[in-house]
Image: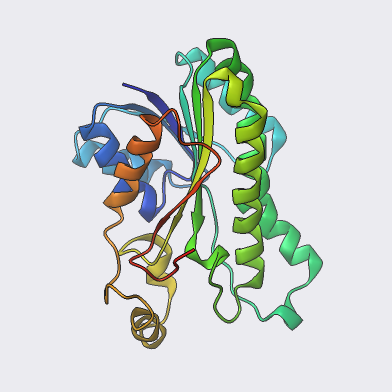
Amino acid sequence: MSRILITGAGGGIAKAIIPVLHELGHSMLLTTRSRSAELKAFLDEHHIDASIITADLTNEAEVIALFTWVEQQGGIDVLVNNAGVAHAAAAWKLEAEEMEKLFQVNFFSAVRCASKALPAMRANGFGRIINISSVVAHKPSFGTSGYAASKSALEGYARGIAIDVANKGITANTIAYGYMEAGMLYDVPEAMLEQIKTTIPKGRFGDASQIGHTIDYLINSPFTTGQTLHVNGGQWMP
C-alpha cells in the first residue's frame, strides 16, 4: 500500500479521510499548521499510528523543512494537498491583498508541496498528486469569488502537472467535494445550510469518508490523470 502525506491534517475533512485510508492499509505522514495536539489525540482515540509535523505551508523555509522530514521518514508515494481556508466576501469588497493571502493557503501551499514531492516521484517512476478542491469552484454562491478562484487555480494546476509527468508513472488529479458533514460546513449559518440543501439533488449533505475512498481509487488508478472527480450529491454536473 501507499505512503501518503496529507496537508491540512488537523481539519474536519482530514479527520474523515484519515481513518478510511488507515483501514485500507495505507500509511500516513500528517502535517498541520496549529492543531498538532488535537490531531495527536484524534489518532490515539482511533488507534492510528501516523507521524505528525507542524508546518506553515505559506512559508518556503518550513516547507523545505517538512520535506526534509518526509525523506527522513522514508519518503512518500502520494501527496494529498488538503490544506485550505474558507473565505466569504462580496467581490466589490475583496481587495487584492486579501485575495493573495487566500491564494497563499489554498493554492501556493500546494505548489510548494508538489514541487518538493515531484523530483523523488519522478526518480522512483511512481507518484500521485491529489488536490482537494470544492464544488464552489464550479458553482459559486454569493461571496465566494475569492475561494472559487483559488480552488479553480488548484484544479488547473493539477491538469498541468498531469501533462508534465504523464510519462513518469505519476498521475495528478483533483477531488472537488460538495457540502459534507464535516469541516467548513459547520462555519455556515443554519439558515444558509437549509437553503444549500435544497440545491443538492440527493437532498442531504455528504459523508466525508467518501473522499477517503476516492483518494484510494485515484491511488490505484494509473490511467486516471488530469481529471476532477466530483463528489457532491449531484449539486454540480459537468
Residue 74: quadrant of the picture: top left
Nearest the eye: 137 or 11: 137
Residue 111: quadrant of the picture: top right
Query: Which residue is painted at 49% across and 60% down in the image?
Result: 134
Seen in the picture, residue 72 relative to 41 is either above or below; the reply is above
Residue 3 horizontal/vertical position (percent):
39, 23
Q: Residue furthest right?
A: 96
Q: Quadrant of the N terminus?
A: top left
Please give left or right for residue 83 compared with residue 233 in the image: right
Query: Which residue is painted at 58% across and 68% down in the image?
Result: 87
Nearest the eye: 162 or 67: 162
Seen in the picture, residue 43 relative to 26 is either above or below; the reply is below
Residue 169 horizontal/vertical position (percent):
52, 20
Seen in the picture, residue 131 relative to 113 is either above or below; the reply is below
Confirm whether residue 60 shows in the render. Answer: yes
Query: Which residue is painted at 46% across and 36% down in the image?
Result: 224
- Colour convention: rainbow
Residue 238 horizontal/vertical position (percent):
49, 63
Query: Which residue is painted at 57% across and 63% down in the image?
Result: 137
Q: How many marks?
A: 0
Confirm whether residue 41 shows in the render. Answer: no
